[in-house]
Image (cartoon, helix red, strand yellow):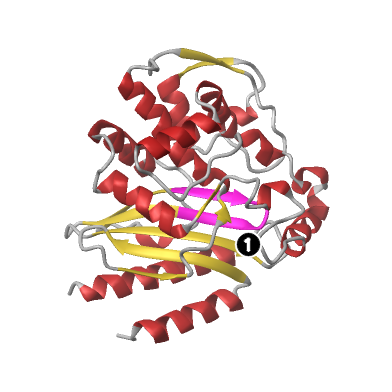
Amino acid sequence: MKNTTTLLTDLRATLRESGLHGSFLVRDLDTGEEVGIDPEIEFPVASLVKIPLALATLERVRRGELDPAMPVEVQPGRMTIPGPTGTSRFRHPARIAVEDLVYLSTCVSDGVAADALFALTPPTEVAAILADLGVTGIAVRHTMDQLTDTPAERFTPSDLHLAHALAIDAGTPGRGHRVPQLDISHANTGTARAFVDLLQAIWHPSLPPEVATALRTLLAANVLRHRLAPDFASDAATWSSKTGTLLNLRHEAGVVEHTDGHRYAVAALTESQVAAGHQPGVDAAMGQVARRLRDHVRAWGT
């Protein structure tokens, strides 16, 4: 088994060769042992913000402030660009219960459903609930509709690479950016460590038990499983997670639970340096790096 320094050198090389900058952290949820690559770097988190949104909504249900069965009028998103899911692509208004909106937002990554929840619990209130529950390191500043107003929506599919080139080249050394959704002073943000801490609070619950149980169920039902799931899901392990994607950002945070009882939280926050919309090789590299980090931590317990 390679020592940690050698492993991290190898994995950084894998990321560079794949055109990725990345921040990773893997933690054994029972022992606390962990290994990572730059886990303190702050990233815009895209749809990963839907985990704290679900947490805040479920906490308000627990407090009796929201009725999970309350129907909410949801206006159609009428999206025609590739990517958005669920009610984001609806053509007509719909009435959907709060609890079902949480499912659509978390498991299908439905941005319109998420914004219906943000209308009930605005970003400032979500942030306050996180603070009340001791969840730190994640900034919730804006709703999801801002993520559908980026340079990608202004180009034709054949010119999409231009939006990615802007995302790659228009940043500043302090992680500011000409694209507001990629500027850490404006965007919803977090670190790999903050999301692993949040997953630990859900799986080794410091959160109210009924809220933690509901979140574990939702993350297990995530239908977007193209990124890290191929490296973690198997007949001997379950993978529960949420993805986040925006322009050149590709993220995922989740927990792998093995049938032998071992559980590992994994967070991968990355930005691609390749100006292309479809990059399956990048997703594969993310999974490879995350799995090798998990294997390294797992070996410590054997």
Q: Position of residue 277 (x, y in %)?
A: 69, 56
Q: Quadrant of the C terminus?
A: bottom left
Identify the residue at horizontal 30%, vertical 46% (top origin): 201
Identify the residue at horizontal 54%, vertical 27% (top origin): 122
Along the line of sight, the residue nearer the viewer: 62 or 283: 62
Identify the residue at horizontal 63%, vertical 19% (top origin): 75
Packing grade of label 1 (10 A; few <14, some 14-19, many >=20) is some
Left/right of residue 177 with respect to residue 14 in the rendered view = right
Q: Position of residue 6 (x, y in %)?
A: 41, 86
Q: Position of residue 223 (x, y in %)?
A: 45, 43
Q: Quadrant of the N terminus?
A: bottom left
The span picked out in magenta is 242-252
Q: Quadrant of residue 60?
A: top left
Q: Quadrant of residue 260?
A: bottom left
Residue at image mark 1:
279
Q: Is residue 5 above or below residue 286?
A: below
Q: Is residue 116 magenta?
A: no
Q: Is residue 44 above or below residue 23?
A: above
Q: Position of residue 189 (x, y in %)?
A: 55, 49
Judged from the image, the secondary structure of the residue bearing numbered disc 1 is loop
Q: Is residue 104 above or below residue 199?
A: above
Q: Is residue 113 above or below residue 66?
A: below
Asked whether residue 287 is in view, the answer is: yes
Looking at the picture, which amino acid does disc 1 mark?
A: Gln
Left/right of residue 119 with respect to residue 256 in the rendered view = right
